[in-house]
Image (cartoon, grey):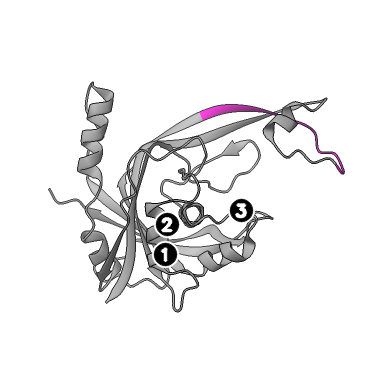
Amino acid sequence: MKEYLLFHLYGPMAAWGDTAVGEFRPSHNHPTRTAVLGLVAAALGIRRHEEERLQALEQSCLVAVRLDATGEVLRDYHTTQVPPEQRKVRHYTRRDELNASKLHTILSQRDYLTDAAATIALSATDDPPIRLQQMAEALQRPALPLYLGRKSCPLALPLEPRLIKANDLKTAFDAYPPVAEQLKKVTEDLHQYGQGIPAPEQFRYYWEEGETTPGMKTEMIYPCRDRLRNRQRWQFDTRSEHYAAEIREE
């Protein structure tokens, strides 16, 4: 038997950063490894400059995703004022930036996912520096604010972290109910018109190399550049991600 840590992620908006070139800031259709571990790091109280602690978390677990609601893409035309780069000049806060004598305007297009929901499953590596129990306790009482990829994307449902022992990843996911029914009721109550978010016709699964997955047949393997190398320098390594889909049973 293997232990898994499962929890839900849902918010009105989320942004799972993809490779960004120029002014376009796309989003993956599901939570990335760096996004998930960034959220767990915030819960543990690990800050962005604490490279050793971030690497310890990076080496502690594998990440898998079950997409419970695909959501829809929202594109935002974004303008930001920033001061030009100057040697020996450092702006510590946004207030400092706006008080600069000269400002430039940066234009960008940023993608968000609206009403998307996912279930995350973490499994421990051999002799992990940070254990799943520690992560579960931190997600119950986060040390820092949690958000879904960007600070403008707060969570809208409890994470409900749960440790589950199972023989494989699919069994662990099956033991943790999808958020679909709860999400449908919540969105109906909030919208008070039309329909809430419908349950998906199929579940989509994403997992890493090395995970035990009988019962799930890989339909596609593709590279993802979302394995942390150095947070300070924004450097990320490539990994292989497996994908499979399963028709949802009523």
Residue extending furthest toward the left: 250
Residue 35 badge: none
Say which amino acid is labelled 3.
Arg
Residue position for label 1: 134
Q: Earlier in the sequence, mark 3 or mark 1?
A: 3
Q: Nearer the viewer, residue 215 or 115?
A: 115
In the image: residue 128, left or right of residue 170? right
Indicate the position of residue 10 as horizontal and vertical percent values. Answer: 35, 42
In the image: residue 41, left or right of residue 113? right
167 part of magenta stretch: no
- The residue at the point 21 percent across, 34 percent down is 185
Q: Residues within 10 Å of mark 2 (few under 14, many from 20)?
A: some
Q: Which residues are magenta?
A: 76-88
Q: Nearer the viewer, residue 87 or 50?
A: 50
Give the alpha-carbon distance from disc 2 to disc 1, as whole Å.
6 Å
Q: Is residue 1 visible?
A: yes
In the image: residue 115, left or right of residue 154? left
- The residue at the point 26 percent across, 77 percent down is 1
- Element on which disc 2 rests: helix
- Element on which disc 3 rests: loop
- Asked if disc 2 and disc 3 are in contact, CB closer than 8 Å, the reply is no
Seen in the picture, residue 210 relative to 25 is either above or below; the reply is: below
Residue 48 badge: 3
Say which amino acid is labelled 1.
Gln
Residue position for label 2: 138
